Amino acid sequence: MKFFVDTAETDQIAELNDLGMVDGVTTNPSLILKSGRDILEVTREIAEMVSGPVSAEVVALTADEMIAEGRKLAQIAGNIAVKVPLTWDGLKACKVLTGEGYMVNVTLCFSANQALLAAKAGATFISPFIGRLDDINLDGMDLIEDIRTIYDNYGFETQILAASIRTVNHACQAALIGADVMTAPPAVIKKMAEHPLTNAGLESFMADWAKTGQKIL
């Protein structure tokens, strides 16, 4: 499974990238706002930092305007994936932009039907939102599983990018189902390394080591 980092904070991306934990980055208007940076400036910096896809989202609502914004964003760097919403206009923009050779991430997906349409429109990535479905008492993992089945049934090459991941369990379950990619905040990715038994075991080892009176350095 590929790991994309869901943030526009370049220092956090750099830390994970140095560990080989970054296969790409996703941003959105909310993350740009949180960073306090200019969208073109911060997107360019991120794209220079990582070799994988960097999703930059359009903010227009009509297909023609999305296409124009997408073309401008794609000119920032060769690894930009233009992010468009899963609306009818977004699908039109996806078709045009992918036809021009750009990577397109179709976002805000909440149903298997939507995912099927995105694949037909040539999307590079489809971003089903797990956490937001959980918020309304639906199981977001059911959606990941349905999309995986449909794409496998027909050989669609669109990659499933599990988004709105909020817990380490989301990450594990998405991997078990077979999502191609997950995007998560840096804190969730780092939390995947934690386990209470690891902490307890380390504490026991350190206590025994202290009793030996020895040093390695």
Image (cartoon, rainbow, N blue to C red):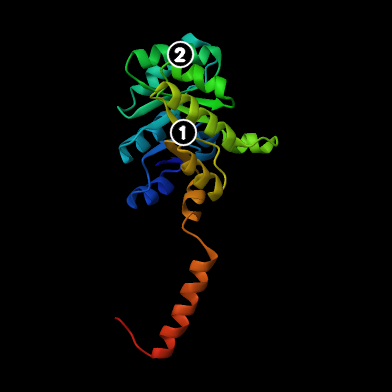
Q: Quadrant of residue 208?
A: bottom left
Q: Residue at x 50, y 31 (%)?
A: 28
Residue 85 higher or lower than 99, as above or below = below
Q: Is residue 207 visible?
A: yes
Q: For the residue marked with disc 2, what is the amino acid?
A: Ala
Q: Quadrant of the C terminus?
A: bottom left
Alpha carbons under labels 1 and 2: distance apart: 19 Å
Q: Which mark is residue 161?
A: 1
Q: Quadrant of the N terminus?
A: top left
Q: Nearer the viewer, mark 1 or mark 2?
A: 1
At which x and y percent is residue 36?
A: 51, 38
Residue that sits furthest to the front in the current view: 153
Q: Depth check: 34 or 169 in front?
A: 169
Residue 61 higher or lower than 57, as above or below = above
SS for dot 1: strand
At which x and y percent is residue 175?
A: 46, 43
Residue 154 higher or lower than 182, as above or below = above
At which x and y percent is residue 76?
A: 34, 26
Q: For the residue marked with disc 1, what is the amino acid?
A: Leu
Residue 112 higher or lower than 164, as above or below = above
Question: Tag 2 or tag 1, which sits nearer the N-term?
Answer: 2
Q: Mark 1 and 2 residues: CB-CB less than 8 Å, in contact?
A: no
Q: Is residue 8 visible?
A: no
Where does label 2 land, which residue? 93
Q: Residue at x 70, y 37 (%)?
A: 137
Q: Which mark is residue 59?
A: none
Q: Residue at x 52, y 72 (%)?
A: 200
At which x and y percent is residue 123?
A: 42, 21
Circle 1 crowding by C-alpha within 10 Å: few under 14, some 14–19, many from 20: many
Q: Quadrant of residue 50?
A: top left
SS for dot 2: helix
